[in-house]
Image: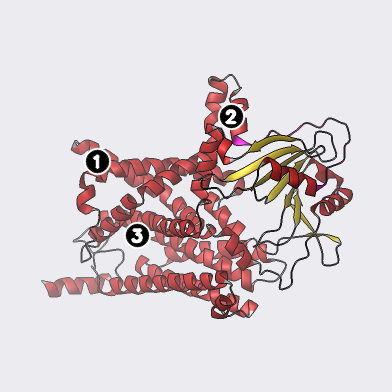
Amino acid sequence: MKAATLRTYISVHTWVGIVAGFFLFIAFYAGAVTLFHEELHAWETPLPQTAVPQRDPQALIDAVLQAHPKAKDMFFLRLPSKTAPELVLEFDERHFRFDASGKLEEFHERSQLVDFIYRLHYTAGLPNSWGIYVLGVVCILYGLALASGVIIYAPSFVKDLFALRIGKNIKRMWQDAHNAIGILSLPFHLMYAWSSAVLALGLILLAPFQYMVFDGKLLQLVGQDINAAAPPQASGTAAPLMPAAQLLAEVQRAAPGIEIETMVYRQAGDANAQLQAYGPMHQQTVASIGAVVLNASTGKVQRAMMPENFSPGTRFLRSLQSLHFASFGDLAVRWMYFILGLAGAFLFYSGNLLWIEARRKRQKLVQPRSGKLMAQATLGVCLGCVAGVSAVFLANKLGPAGQLPLWEARSYYAVFFGCVLWAFARPPARAAHELLVLCAALTLAVPLAHWWNTSRNPLLALLQGDGVVTGVAIVALLVATLFWKMARAALHRGRHGDPHSVWSLRTPAQQAAEVQQAA
């Protein structure tokens, strides 16, 4: 490859990586946490000590429709599960259930810890209305950075794959770590770049073909691959709903082995009322979520979507979703994704550090201002995200009851923007040490706050069969230890490392004196 061409690819890889890196660090770090969505939902909202009485789903439906007739247009019924044992009906962002006495009550979710971190994953903290589209564009840039990186480093792939040269050459060490993680996890990153762009921008990407190629009929052709069924049109003829228990029996006959988690009703009380029932099939396939569509008044099955009869388009989309969310396999798959997710966050962090090292002036005491600004931005955004996520966990256990969702969101943004401001107010070396200590302290405080709030000792919880509490405590302890070691390393480098660096803690006068002594 010509030198000019290689420089072009390096420039593309560098600048695209920097532009996308800040967003992707947040997306990967938050995404790694939300891989354990169900387990963390049980952690954020402790399960009731007494058994929740099993209620008739139809009784809840009738009670809500009687009290709120507008719900008939569309509502969701969330069936009890191991981590969420209550029967809940949702419509228009309102939640209903039966209280202990069997009376209908509207309630607000006690906590939105996992949901908030999940929103961070696909919006990077931007407003929901347009943040997802920004992340979709970022993922396209992410794919471009991956492609250019492969082209640049393919010639030295075998030679440098397992090289990790630790020594005085900091740039070489970061380069080795960045390249090894990038190449070894390349299939994972390609899948994420592709699936994220499709899931976030799929309909937008189809728009040119919809209007310029298929004369406005493309969505009609692919609609059944995207959704189980189109929303029904009301007939105007009243008809009672078939009891939910009978509808569930019809679903089981149409899709044997399906474990229904969600029932979606539309146009309830009309002859064209529709039910879409979703749940896992527990089959040995990547895409294992099944769906059955019925007429909710007659119980007639209109469509049964099971992995063995998926169309090619449905199989592609469902498999892409399963690969993205690690909903295939079991716990081992999610732990693998968790490690790869944290490694991905490190990839973007190390990429920015490489940019700083590449522009360092080896024989000058005063470093370029661009390097200092990049160091401060990297510390503020990346470590601000880490500290902010830990703060959300703390707010869940220490915030006032009844206001946890508000305090969880406030805690993240307060800590995140506080870290960004701190990073720009302090020298990079000081900020690195101080913010890493903050990350370690907040993360270590998570299991302690849970213990104080619930009086549940993590070790005793494991003996009682609650692996979630113990698992969160162990991960928090390991991650806090890692941040503490990184903080010590940053302080050591600042005091004893190369003085010609933005990471040095020595003043220009001290540096000049050392240079004179060396001469």
Single out the mark in the foreground, 2 or 1.
2
Q: Residues within 10 Å of mark 3 (few under 14, many from 20)?
A: many
Queried whether the magenta region covers residue 227, the answer comes back as yes
Q: Which residue is mark 1?
A: 7
Mark 3 and mark 1 lie on one chain; the one further toward the N terminus is: 1
Where on the picture, by quarter, is residue 41?
Answer: bottom right
Single out the mark in the foreground, 3 or 2.
2
Mark 2 and mark 1 lie on one chain; the one further toward the N terminus is: 1
Q: Residues within 10 Å of mark 1 (few under 14, many from 20)?
A: few
Q: Which residue is mark 2?
A: 222
Residue visible at 61% across and 22% down in the picture: 217
- In the foreground, 450 or 429: 450
Q: Which residues are magenta?
A: 226-244
Image position, residue 363 (x, y; %):
18, 61
User: Can residue 6 be seen by looking at this rendering?
Assistant: yes
Q: Which residue is mark 3?
A: 372
- In the foreground, 444 or 506: 444
Look at label 2 and name its amino acid.
Val
User: Can residue 359 be seen by looking at this rendering?
Assistant: no
Mark 3 and mark 2 lie on one chain; the one further toward the N terminus is: 2
Image position, residue 21 (x, y; %):
41, 51
- In the foreground, 320 or 23: 320
Alpha carbon separation for disc pair 3 and 2: 50 Å
Look at label 3 and name its amino acid.
Lys
Look at label 1 and name its amino acid.
Arg
SS assignment at label 3: helix
Q: Is residue 11 left or right of residue 389?
A: left
